[in-house]
Image (tube, helix red, strand yellow):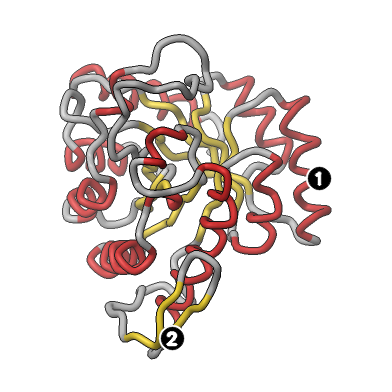
Amino acid sequence: MKFGVSTFLTDQGIAPAALGRAAEERGFDSLFIAEHTHIPVDRRTPYPRGGELPEMYYRTLDPFVALASVASVTERILLGTGIALVAQRDPLVTAKEVASLDLVSGGRAVFGVGVGWNKEEMANHGTDPRTRGRLVDERLRAIRELWTREKAEFHGEFVDFDPVYSWPKPVRRPHPPIYVGGGEGAFHRVAALGDAWLAISASPEELGPQIERLWSLADRDVPVTVYAVPPDPEVVEWYARLGVERALFYLPTVPEVETLAHLDRFAEVAGRFR
């Protein structure tokens, strides 16, 4: 099993470059960071985990700027969005951002994607929450066209452009891996458009059957990366037995000294399985 780190990077926690360097020094293979452009003050959509929405949600750094900073001080670690909110992103701009990150990092970009839960946030981007799933599917298809064709064009319900030149192309061919986040409602997207499933940490009794259903639907053994894993050896052992490819430990958004202590604890747990 591979081990990485998942977190929210904000202006109140460790700096991106310092985190990337520390994670790579401790042997982690990947860093996945969250995205929110903003959080509406008047929000009716409940926080999925219940209670008050943590402040880190509206203080997140731009993921591609932050990951480019990490790329500049690292050599091996994969640089992932966990997740990029495609329902809120222009596909032409996003294709260029991901490809640019892949280029400057030497082919280390991972495009973790999702639909999103905050209806008021996506509405501020002009997205109708009722059609966000179809919108994301179209944008992902358009982005793949922009990455893989010299003269790319796309004509759909939501995305429409005549032939265009869009460079740079990604270093990794045919394109950076797309990790699709979400629950079972996203399985059709994983099967059709994804290179891996980015699952939220759950009990083995819940996650095991989900993986089996996904593999049956996709007619292939889709790699599974689990997001927000606690540093519990027993939980990690469960995931290893389920065939999970990668566990992403959840790193709280805290200052550098506290962050390094968390990373040391994660590295100690990961070291038991290497």
Q: In the image, residue 18 lies at what x, y percent?
A: 18, 37
Side (left or right) of 221 relative to 35: right
As drawn, 85 above or below 226: below
Side (left or right) of 12 relative to 169: left
The residue where tag 1 is placed is: 213
Amino acid carrying label 1: it is: Arg
For image coordinates 39% across by 17% down, the residue present is 53
For image coordinates 51% across by 45% down, the residue present is 115
Which of disc 1 and disc 2 is earlier in sequence? 2
Amino acid carrying label 2: it is: Arg
Q: Secondary structure at mark 2?
A: loop
As drawn, 13 above or below 97: above
| Residue in the foreground of this view, choosing between 116 and 222 | 116
Side (left or right) of 252 relative to 127: left
> Which circle, 2 or 1, is nearer the viewer?
2
Q: Quadrant of residue 92?
A: bottom left
The residue where tag 2 is placed is: 149
| Residue in the foreground of this view, choosing between 137 and 219 | 137
Which numbered circle lies on residue 53? none
Q: Calculate the distance from the C-alpha at mark 2 to the C-alpha at mark 1.
A: 33 Å
